[in-house]
Image (cartoon, rainbow, N blue to C red):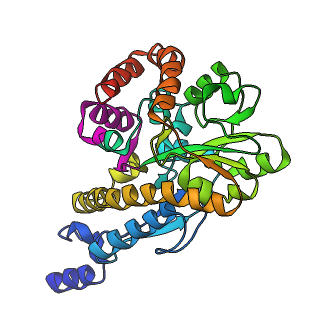
Amino acid sequence: MKKRHLLQALASLPLASLPFAPAWAQSATLKISHQFPGGTINEGDFRDRLVRRFAAEVEKRSKGVLKFEIYPGSSLMKTNSQFAAMRKGALDLALIPLSYAGGEIPEVNIGLMPGLVVSYEQATSWKTRPVGAELNRVLLDKGIVLISWIWQAGGVASRSKPVVEPEDAKGMKIRGGSREMDMILKEAGAAVVTMPSNEIYAAMQTGAMDAAMTSSTSFISFRLEEVAKALTTGRTGAYWFMFEPLMMSKAIFDKLPKEQQATIMAVGAEMEKFALEAAKKDDVDVAAIYQKAGAKVVDLSSATIKKWQAIARQTAWKDYGARNEGSAKLLALAEQTL
């Protein structure tokens, strides 16, 4: 009788609560946040499409045990709150420009260091080079797991003249996107404006800002061609390259079974090919969109990129490397990839 009652009791329990239940049977619904416009899995900002593809593929491979809720446009929480929320385990995943967390962790500003990355080939090499291993270690130590390594080139949209050479920035109010990017703008004679990319449109529309640096994808998604008369693209090379990864709270990640962790990491890595192709496509597409809107579109020469890089070495790189030992180590490792 006792054996029969025990079997009946076990049969009434959820599968995931049984001591011999397979790890994949432990279900969870995870939230993914980002600041970019929402769309569908096939249309819209590629960063939104990436998280939707990621979510769909992980759900498929986990047989529906892992599910996701996606919150675009900072609809779940404020843009600058996402990183800290992940560190505390209050947010599961987010796709964020890493440099936005520079106030909390100075080392991560290497993700938008002017002139340190000048091509996609160099950028994608970071993941398997010592600089990538060290950056991954730093983030794990701070409670963050890198899921997908995503890089984007960018340029400058302006309400008036093109910003190409350093002297073009003099006297203008410009958004750089990171502390270090702001430093080279100041050195060039600009006044800097600080805000996340989803606030650029309003600032340029009202004249509170003359120009803004951001990624090609953001130039498209935030429809800045409506308020810009000039665009400097990143399609032939750039000194503005942003590391914008899909990340996960380590506190949440560590609670998942090993099989689910492995699935998340595998799918995250597979998304990187899609991100690279989409980012390169946007570098080209943005030029056509702005030309059609009547803006003057210009590209950067290698000589011009070197001018900005020289300013960066003496200002941003020097300042960043002096902040702490971790920053100095990351900078030295990153320079090995140039």
170 or 138: nearer the eye? 170
Residue at point 63%, 54% (across, down) = 77
Where residue 272 appears, as percent x and y from the top left, is 34, 56
For the stretch drawn in magenta, the main secondary structure is helix
Instruction: Please check the rendered image and state whether residue 128 is part of the magenta-colored stretch, yes or no.
Output: yes
Residue at point 26%, 62% (across, down) = 263
Quick check: 195 above or below 116? below
Where residue 124 appears, as percent x and y from the top left, is 32, 44
22 or 245: nearer the eye? 245
- Which residue sits furthest right? 206
Which quarter of the figure is the C terminus placed in?
top left
| Residue 144 in sight here | yes
Where residue 38 appears, as percent x and y from the top left, is 58, 67
Residue at point 40%, 40% (across, down) = 143
Where residue 103 appears, as percent x and y from the top left, is 57, 30
Left/right placement of residue 10 relative to residue 335 reads left
Q: Which residues are magenta?
A: 125-150
